[in-house]
Amino acid sequence: MTTTMTTKSSLTTIRQAFDGVPLVAQAVIDSPIGPLTALATARGIAGLWFDDQTHHPGALDAPVDPRNPHIVAMKRWLDIYWKARPGRDPSPCEVPLDLHGSPFQRAVWKALLTIPFGRTRSTAAIRI
């Protein structure tokens, strides 16, 4: 038996979120835990996925350009993140983000940006 659940966050699919959004670049970024695909608009990073994750959007309608400034900034940030030590925390403000999704999804992502580096929060502790 297969059950399909609909939640607030799944009401807007990745394809719907990017419908009509001019995508300017994509590139694969190697990481210690597997390859990631970064997606950029003219305003910033619009998506970052593990290449083998279940909900990867599949083929993206954006040129491959690992030299795009937003993708370069994302790669630099991730390199710092993987090597970070206490006191040398990478700030999420160092990479311009261009978040697309439902109002609920954008609210969750903004709340996640307030969690200090290296810390966790329960779902109940996050105010949306």
Image: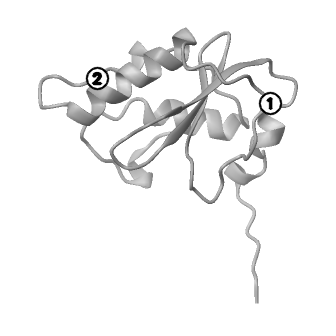
Image position, residue 128 (x, y; %): 54, 39
The number of discs equals: 2
Q: Which residue is mark 1?
A: 61
Query: Residue 115: image x %, image y %?
Result: 34, 35
Q: Quadrant location of the N terminus?
A: bottom right
Which residue occupies 20% across, 31% down? 84
Q: Earlier in the sequence, mark 2 or mark 1?
A: 1
Q: 117 above or below 72?
A: below
Residue at left 22%, top 25%? 89
Q: Taking 49 as reference, is 100 above or below it?
A: above
Identify the residue under disc 2.
90
Which type of secondary structure does the marked residue at label 1 adopt?
A: loop
* Amino acid marked by disc 2: Pro
Give the residue displayed 68% in from the left and 10% down from the top: 42
Q: In the figure, residue 17 lies in which quadrant?
A: top right
How would you rate the neighbour count of disc 2 (Cα within 10 Å): few for under 14, some for 14-19, many for 20 or more? some
* Nearer the observer, 127 or 85: 85
Classify residue 84 as left or right of residue 65.
left
Q: Which class describes the residues within 10 Å of circle 1: few (<14), some (14-19), or many (20+)?
A: few
